[in-house]
Image: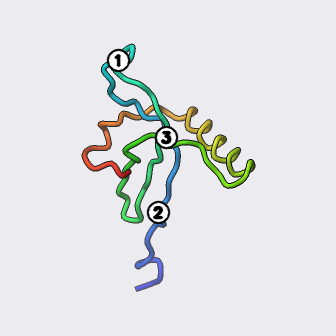
Amino acid sequence: MTDTDTATTPAKWRHVVIRRPYGGGLDGHFLAIHEEHTGSDGSVSITEEAVAAQGDTIEELRESLVRMLKALEAPVKDFDSYGPGPTS
């Protein structure tokens, strides 16, 4: 057995745009930015609530906003497509 046989993929996260159901929206939905977490076992979940831009410095806040803006370039995902058990 080699080291690569026992190695796992590190967990990662990214911002994603999520379409969430809402009775008052134009089409019954609204969009929000969430964090999508991919575990080392390949499992994928999102935060239950939308996330805010934050940082300890202006530069960290800027980086957070840039990551969020990058999420706008990817396809919108449906909240319900993640199944039960989003993380908070």
Query: Could you tell me which secondary element the residue under label 1 belongs to?
Result: loop
Classify mark 2: helix, strand or loop: loop
In the figure, 79 relative to 23: above or below? below
Disc 3 marks a residue whose amino acid type is Val
Q: Position of residue 19 (x, y in %)?
A: 40, 30
Q: Residue at x 26, y 44 (%)?
A: 83
Residue 56 x %, y %:
67, 55
Residue at x-position 45% and y-position 31%: 76
**Mark closer to the chain start, 1 or 2:** 2
C-alpha distance separating marks 1 and 3: 22 Å
Q: Is residue 19 above or below residue 12?
A: above
Quadrant assignment for the N terminus: bottom left
Number of residues whose C-alpha sits closer than 10 Å to that of mark 2, classed few (under 14), some (14–19) or many (20 or more): few
Q: Amino acid at mark 2?
A: Ala
Residue appearing at x 40%, y 47% in the figure: 46
Q: Which residue is mark 3?
A: 16
Check disc 1 and report the residue beneath it: 24
Q: Disc number at residue 11?
A: 2
Under mark 1, the amino acid is: Gly
Mark 2 or mark 3: which comes first in sequence? Answer: 2
The CA distance from mark 1 to mark 2 is 36 Å
- Most distant residue in the top direction: 26
> Could you tell whether 54 is left or right of 82 in the image?
right
